[in-house]
Each structure stands twice: as structure tokens, then as C-alpha cells.
Image (spheres, grey):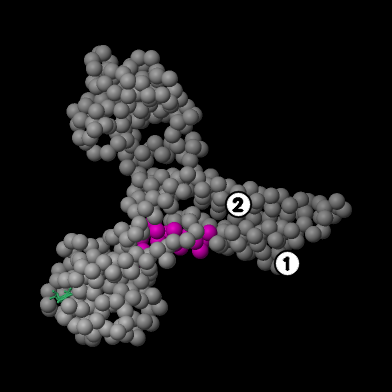
Amino acid sequence: MTDTIFALSSGSLPSGLAVVRVSGPAVRFVIETTIGRPPEPRRAALKTIRDTNGEAIDRGLALFFPAPGSFTGEDVAEFHLHGGRAVVAAFLAFLGSLPGLRLAEAGEFTRRAFDNGQLDLTEAEGLADLIAAETEAQRRLALRLAGGAFRARAEDWRRRLIDLRAYVEADLDFSDEEDVPDDVSGGVGIGIAALRDEMERELTAGQRGERIRDGFEVVVLGPPNAGKSSLVNVLAERDVAIVTDIPGTTRDLLEVHLDLGGYAVTLVDTAGLRDGGDVIEAEGMRRGRVRAAAADLILWLDEEGDGAPEDVVGLGVRILSIHAKIDLHSPGREGLGVSVHDRASIDRLLQRLAQEAASRLGGEAPLVSRARQRQCLDQAVATLRDAESPGLPKEIMADRLRQAGEALGRLTGRIDVEEVLGSIFSTFCIGK
Ligand SMILES: Nc1nc2c(ncn2[C@@H]2O[C@H](COP(=O)(O)OP(=O)(O)OP(=O)(O)O)[C@@H](O)[C@H]2O)c(=O)[nH]1
Ligand SMILES: [Mg+2]
């Protein structure tokens, strides 16, 4: 028999209210013990909540969600208590003393929802992202996923794959007979190509999805003393990096996270680029270049307004050139000028960065937003590509279609995912 689990599902105490959630076979027993008769399903009832001796712990709302119409698919009860530490501690201790009840592990409610088919993996991931979302774009993306947009899409793909395979297999079984039309495999070819095309478009859009989720990365490069660390500090509105007038102050990579126009942006400060320098500085420069090569945007900063040198341009990453310390020099002819002492110039830069992020991450809403999802979809596309090879024997084609379906099954968690489950659900907090 499964344990009945409970946890504080709302935030840190003390708080106005505290929501304690209970899920499992003993929920009716818990309700009868604490408040007596169960309230009408899914209706809040104001009750005195008592322990086994009949002593009042608190007065608050109780809700009962009978299986399977609950978040976990099991019987669920919710108690809305006053959010005092002693209130919650007393109630949790009381629940823990009841037979068959124990405190939930991180993500265990969601895990049960998944196990009972209330959610697929992409929805569970969307829910985790929704709880973790810090910017508007992250929230929108996560809400779409949690609402089942990806699940619906993947299920449609899977159904079409099954149909295609049925055609190919019928063709195999009846290849000697008259009543299977010859052009069946031609139609199958078109069907496979259309499916593959849709998946590939989702993969392309997904590059934006992963950026929205993980952050748009901007690496600040420039010669020593250009004012990179000062700029990063001003943009972050806190003293992250050490600033001195000694060239070569920064060595390690330092990152700060910003919300620009609803997009998560990671800003990375680096060691100033120059010839020479000691071993530590040289290593710092190397790390800066490596990070910049994988960035979405390089912010090149120099006092002369010369722009980025050849070796930086050669990294093949989009560059925004900035003329630094315009309070000391007149701004260059081209590009943007900033001074950490001129708020208006900083605001112009922030606006420009927000535009850069929006133009790269905006557009049609993506579904793919995690490496795991991309890998599953990549696999499905590769297998479909294989199935399209000219002259492929029908048996192998049918098998490839089956494999593509399996890749989608791994995406939604229908099959074969035991090893990824632990890693996904453990990212949830306790009580979710
Ligand atoms: N007048 C003026 N001085 C600035 C400005 N930005 C930075 N500085 C000064 O320039 C010097 C170097 O600034 P940092 O921010 O340490 O420069 P950096 O590019 O990080 O240098 P490294 O870490 O050595 O590569 C410091 O003395 C700053 O106070 C600015 O906009 N105007
Ligand atoms: Mg620095």
C-alpha cells in the first residue's frame, strides 16, 4: 500500500497563510480525524482543525479532492492554516504521528501526478519551470508547457507515426495481394517528410526556447582598463566585480543575471584582452574568449571607439561595439557611447540590449526549452531521415518509424525514462 504523503506546499514561514497538502489512501482518515465529516468535494469549508485528542490546532479552510480528480490523481486534502511557525509545526507533527503518513520528498506530489498519468514529462518540466520562472518570457514559456502544449503536439506526432507504420506494415503483409494500392509507400514518404519537417521547425524554434529558459548570454570583452567591470557593476546595480585603475584587475569570469524587457540575460565580465600578462591573466583571457565564442552577443568595450579586433570578429558571434568613458572622450562616430557616470547612456545601452534579446528570442512561441527535450526530438528526426532513405526495405522502414515513436515516448515519459525521472523530480521543492 502506498504511503500517504504530506508537506507544507506554500512558502517560508511566518506568512499570512500556510497551505499543507496531503495525498494518498489515508486522506479520508486524516479528514475524519481532524475535522470530522469530509467537506463537499472541491469546496472550501471553514473548520476547526483538531488533533487525535480533539484539541484544536488551528481554525482554517479544508478542501477535499477525491481521486482521480486531483493534482496527484489520488485522494488529496488541503488545509489552509495560519502561517505561524508553531501552528504549522504542530500540524505537521500531528500528521506525522498518524499511521501510514510521512513527509513528502522533493517533487513527490508531481511524481505521483506523473505516475498516475495526470501529467506527462513535458508538463512536469513546464511546472518546474513555472515555479522557477523569474522573467515574463520564462513564465509564458513555462505556462504553455505546463498547460500541455508540447504534450498535445507530441501525441499528435505519435499518432501519425503509428498510422504511417500501419500503412507500411500492411504493405508488407499484403505485398503479394491485389487490394493494397501500389502508391501506399509514396504517400507514406510524404507523410514522413511532413512530420520530420514539423519536428525540425520545433527544433529551430527551440533554440530560442532554451535561451529563454537558460538566459541570453552577453560576454563583455575589451582591453584592460576599458571599464568592463565598472559597466557590469552599473548594469547589475551592485558591486559584483573589483574595479581598480590597474590594468589586468579581472581574471576570473564573473556573471550576473538581469531581467531585460522580460528576458533573462546573463552578463559575463572577463579579463581584459592584451598581449603578455602573467600566467593567471593569460588563463583569464583564454577563458573569456572561450565563453565569448559560445555567447549570443559580445559587448566590445574600448576607450578609443576602435571596435573589436580581427581575432574577436573571427569568433563569429554578433558584436555590439561600445565606446567607453565618454565623459573623458568625445564619443566615436559610430556605435554606442557609455559612461558609468552618465545614467542616460547606461539606460540607452540597457534598452539596446533588451532589443537585441527580444529580436533574437521573440517570435512564434517555442515548445522545446530543455536539452533533454531537444535530444529526444533530434533522435526522432534522425530516425525519420533514415526512414526516408531511397530504396529502404519496408521492414526497416517500419522499424525506423517504431524507433521514432519511441523517441517521442521518451520525450513525454511514456517509456523508458526511469533514469531521467529522478533528475527531473528532484529539482522540485518539497510540497510540489
Ligand atoms: N571617467 C570614467 N572612468 C571610468 C569609467 N569606467 C571605468 N572607469 C575607470 O577606469 C578604471 C578601470 O575600470 P575597470 O572597470 O576596472 O576596467 P576593466 O575593463 O574591468 O579592466 P580589467 O579588469 O583590468 O580588464 C577604473 O579606475 C574605473 O574607475 C567611466 O565611464 N568613466
Ligand atoms: Mg575588470
| Residue 254 at x, y percent in the picture | 23, 66
Q: Decide whether residue 121 is among the magenta residues.
A: no
Q: Quadrant of residue 124?
A: top left
- Of 135 and 55, nearer the camera is 135
| Residue 342 at x, y percent in the picture | 19, 71
Which residue carries the number 2 mark? 157
Residue labelled 1 has its Cβ within 8 Å of some atom of ligand 1: no
| Residue 265 at x, y percent in the picture | 32, 62
Give SS at disc 2: helix
| Residue 329 at x, y percent in the picture | 19, 83
Give SS at disc 1: loop
Q: Decide whether residue 215 is among the magenta residues.
A: yes
Above or below for 191 versus 151: below
- Of 398 and 320, nearer the camera is 320
Which residue carries the number 1 mark? 391
Q: Is residue 285 visible?
A: no
Q: Counting residues from the N terminus, which is met first, the one under dot 2 or under dot 1?
A: 2
The residue type indicated by label 2 comes to Trp
Q: Main secondary structure of the magenta part?
A: helix
Cα–Cα span, label 2 and label 1: 24 Å
Figure quadrant of the C terminus: top left
Q: Residue at x 24, y 17 (%)?
A: 56
| Residue farthest to the right, as pictured | 178
Residue numbers of the magenta segment: 202-217
- Of 327 and 169, nearer the camera is 327
